[in-house]
Amino acid sequence: MRPIVVLLLVLGLAACGERSQEPQTGQRSYQGKRDTLPWDNGPLTAEYRGAQWKQGDRASWEHSIKQRQLGQHEHKRIYQ
């Protein structure tokens, strides 16, 4: 009985540990590409009928997002 209790205690304590997730010296860290700004991406193609904005123009992108948001607002959608 005692070996089983000791085994369960050891397994229980081992499950509570947390290893460091930082890369060790000499290991390579993530070298992925950097995120881009949303308005720097091109708008969807015409086949998807997505909102159109000028690529790189933050104001037109924000206007497009605002129009999309208004189309998803239930009160405004029903009572227009």
Image (cartoon, rainbow, N blue to C red):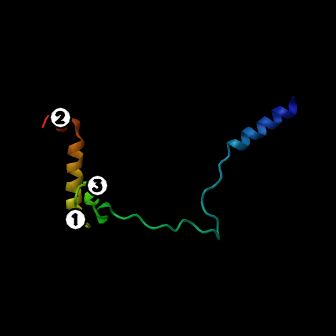
Say if mark 1 contacts mark 3, CB within 8 Å.
no
Residue visible at 29% across and 64% down in the picture: 42
Q: Residue furthest top?
A: 1
In 3D space, how far apart are the residues under numbered discs 1 and 3 (Cα atoms)? 16 Å
Q: Nearer the viewer, residue 52 or 36?
A: 52
Taking the image as shown, residue 78 lies to the left or right of residue 18, namely left
Amino acid type at image mark 1: Lys
Amino acid type at image mark 2: Ile
For marks 1 and 3, the one nearer the N-term is 3
Residue 54's disc is: 1
In 3D space, how far apart are the residues under numbered discs 2 and 1 (Cα atoms)? 30 Å
In 3D space, how far apart are the residues under numbered discs 2 and 3 (Cα atoms)? 24 Å
Amino acid type at image mark 3: Tyr
Q: Position of residue 13 (x, y in %)?
A: 73, 41
For marks 2 and 1, the one nearer the N-term is 1
For marks 2 and 3, the one nearer the N-term is 3
Q: Split into 4 quadrants, where in the image is the C terminus? A: top left
Q: Residue furthest front?
A: 47
Q: Quadrant of residue 21?
A: bottom right
Taking the image as shown, residue 32 lies to the left or right of residue 54, namely right
Q: Position of residue 61 (x, y in %)?
A: 23, 59
Q: Which residue matches tag 2?
A: 78
Q: Residue furthest bottom?
A: 26
Q: Position of residue 59 (x, y in %)?
A: 20, 61
From the image, state whether disc 1 or disc 3 is nearer to you: 3
Residue 48's disc is: 3
